[in-house]
Image (tube, rainbow, N blue to C red):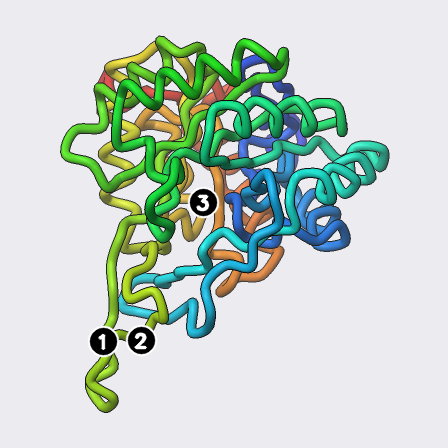
Amino acid sequence: MSYEGELTKISLAVDLAGLKLRSPIMNASGVLGISIPLLKRVYNSGTGAVITKSIGPLSRPGHPNPTMVHVEGGVLNSMGLPNPGVDYFSIEVKELSDAGVPVIASFFASTIDEFTDSSIKLERAGARALELNLSCPNVSGESGMCATDPYTTEKVTAAVKSVTKLPLFVKLSPNVTDIIPIAKAAEFGGADAITVTNTLKGMAIDIDFKKPILSNVTGGLSGPALKPVALRYVWEIYEAVKIPIIGCGGINNWRDAVEYLLAGSTALEVGTAIMTHGFEIFNEINEGISQYMVENKFNDLKEMIGLAHKS
């Protein structure tokens, strides 16, 4: 059976907390997120917007190699948030914005003032939304992990929201005992959406050298192995908050994407799959979702969001 006629009528456009997206699919922060040509290529491959690598207040070298290792079911990375700093990267954001590419700027910091100053600079540069990274698992002794604490999550979210008019998405950590109080804290702080979830802390050991493979010992697990954990968090958070959810973790094909939508995600981020499928993954997912909508007689993507909770 051919679905070509029906597929041409399907729109995947979504409204993500006021940010209009032509497709619910985006690249996950940290993947192809620091190069203007690559981010343009990501957008031209079918994403609704592009998300930058997490940018800090100052340039940062990150951890020494080795910083990445393939493991069963995914990838462990311990990059350590290398970036050129918000002042330099604001120029890149402006260039992308001027080229018509909707940019969601991911950023992190160590103090309230740094968080607010960075958000102001990224807004002035032309970012269309901000993703507040409170949850990097491979930095220590700084606010990269403040998403493990509801009070700090609410405090930082509220501070950033007080200085920007942009939609603010708060990225949560899976490395917690109970994610619900943290999701609610982000909502109370004024978050416009929640990104669920960052990578899961893990490690790998080289049995020949008898030592950890990563220079930082531990890193963040991404890829298919993360999906059941992240999907569960999307499900639970959908029942606990009223703001939209951006599902992220182990999306490897359109079927994974549909699961996230049915669990309650309004938009989705794809990361590790780009390494194995290339830029084509975005349009493959878009086409798969469109065909699923035709087969199941959905007229609007909104009809799918959270539907599994009602079945």
Query: Residue tagged by mark 3?
Result: 254
Question: Which residue sits at x=54%, y=31%?
Answer: 24
Vertical placement of residue 295 versus 204, above or below: above
Sort mark 2 into few (<14), some (14-19) or many (20+) by Cα contacts within 10 Å. Answer: many
Residue carrying label 1:
205
Percent position (x, y) of residue 77? 40, 61
The reply to whether residue 287 is in sight is no
Q: Is residue 188 at least partly visible in the picture?
A: yes
Q: Nearer the viewer, residue 307 or 158?
A: 158
Contact, CB < 8 Å: mark 3 with mark 2?
no
Residue occupying image coordinates x 48% and y 46%: 270
**In the image, what residue occupies the spot 57% across and 17% down?**
167
* Sequence-first disc among 3 and 2: 2
Residue 213, labelled with which disc?
2
Check whether the beta carbons of the residues at disc 2 and disc 1 lie within 8 A of each other.
Answer: yes
Q: What percent of the width, then of the height, locates residue 229?
A: 23, 42
Q: Amino acid at mark 3?
A: Trp
Residue 91, percent from left and from top: 79, 40
Give the residue type that dot 2 points to: Ile
Q: Earlier in the sequence, mark 2 or mark 1?
A: 1
Query: Could you tell me which quadrant the C terminus lies in?
Result: top left
Nearest to N terminus: mark 3 or mark 1: 1
Q: Nearer the viewer, mark 3 or mark 1?
A: 1
Residue type marked 1? Ile
State left or right for residue 276 relative to residue 32.
left
Q: Residues within 10 Å of mark 1 (few under 14, many from 20)?
A: few
- On screen, residue 209 versus residue 19, left or right, reads left
